[in-house]
Image (cartoon, helix red, strand yellow):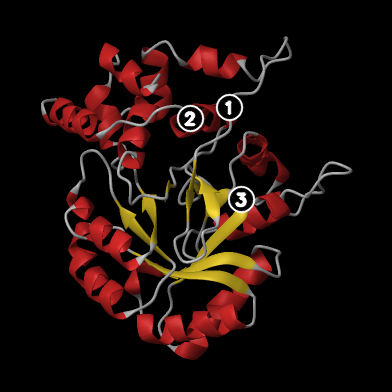
Amino acid sequence: MPPSRRAVLAGAGLLPLSLSRFGTSAVAAEPAALLRRPIPSTGETLPVIGIGTSRRYEVEPTAEAIAPLREAVQRFVALGGSVIDTAPSYGTAEDVLGLILAQDGIPGQDSLREKVFLCSKVGTPGREAGAAEIARSFKRLNTGMIDLIAVHNLIDPSANLATLRELKAQKKIRYVGVTVWRDSQFGDLEALMKRETLDVIQVNYALDDRRAAERILPLAAERGMAVMVNVPFGRDRLFKAVQGRALPAWTAEFDCATWPQFFLKYVLGHPAVTCPIPGMAKAAYVEDNLGAARGRLPDAAQRTRMEAFVDAL
């Protein structure tokens, strides 16, 4: 079984440091603001790290089960994060996220929902069935507006994109997109990107899964489409590969302090990438991951060195 992220952090001597930041002792000044990148179709900028809710937010919608997830989302927003991605197919994730975002804000401040760039998907074929699924998402997420809805895994894109564009015209959603999660879908994705006007695509891309950089990412830049990246940790393969290894000293050249930051900074080093969305179910992981959204990013030569390092493991 691949090692958990906790095991990798603990093995590197980093987990206690991260957790200590949430104690009751004196707290250091908050870190610098997160890097931001634009959605090309509007110029609106987003923080460059988001939260993905697949698997980790698929819990029973009880106060006890939701508590650590609520803490993670609160910490994420407090540190400047905003993008949270979910889907109807992620079990109870939409319900759980809806409960978390429904909490009252701090008096005199915006509510948690108002600070989140909320993303979901539609993954049912047919106009009526797709529209019904979207309606359920609004209800489960407890919101009257969803910032982005994407066609999940290119399921019936003609019908679902037509529905999404109607919702966009009605100002119920702000952006329209499509998603894939495996390399075998890239041919269909490329064809769709060439014939459709899309605000956002979501694609799998990681240090050990680089095929999207061959054609998909350049095409997104050419067509003016923002890029969200799923599974940026290579479905945990990368954590397994570096278990027990020390972070190379040269990673300080791009302000990298942990292995998760190493993997995320590689993804962000590609100029076409807008926002990777790693799963973050604990506040400590939020703290660590958002470190990748600060400081310098690796340049082309440094990214090549990162590739060679991982390929040699």
Query: Element under label 1?
Result: loop
Label 3: which residue? 60
- Percent x, y for residue 170? 64, 82
Find residue 104 and report its horizontal and vertical position in percent: 82, 48
Q: Which of marks 1 and 3 is nearer the N terminus?
A: 1
Q: Indicate whether 164 appears above or below 243.
A: below
The reply to whether callout 1 and callout 2 are in contact (CB within 8 Å) is yes
Q: Which residue lies furthest to the left in this view?
A: 312
Query: Alpha-carbon distance for marks 3 and 2?
Result: 34 Å
Q: Name the residue under label 2.
A: 294
Disc 2 marks a residue whose amino acid type is: Arg
| In front of the other: 131 or 111 | 111
Q: Examine the rendered structure and indicate whether residue 291 appears above or below residue 14.
A: below
Q: Which mark is residue 135?
A: none
Crowding at label 1, few (<14), some or many (≥20) Cα neighbours within 10 Å? Answer: few
The label nearer to you, 3 versus 2, is 2
**Residue 281 appears at what percent x and percent y?**
54, 38
Distance of label 1 from label 3 (alpha carbons):
35 Å
| Quadrant location, the N terminus | top left
Q: Are marks 3 and 2 in contact (CB under 8 Å)?
A: no
Pick whichever, 306 or 120, lies toward us: 306
What is the x, y in percent for residue 63? 72, 44
Query: Image check: 172 left or right of 213?
Result: right
Residue 248 visible in the current orientation: no
Q: At numbered mark 3, what does the secondary structure look like: helix, strand or loop?
A: loop
Give the numbered dot on residue 32. 1
Q: In this rendering, would 34 be left or right of 259?
A: right
Query: Secondary structure beneath disc 2?
Result: loop
228 versus 294 height, above or below? below
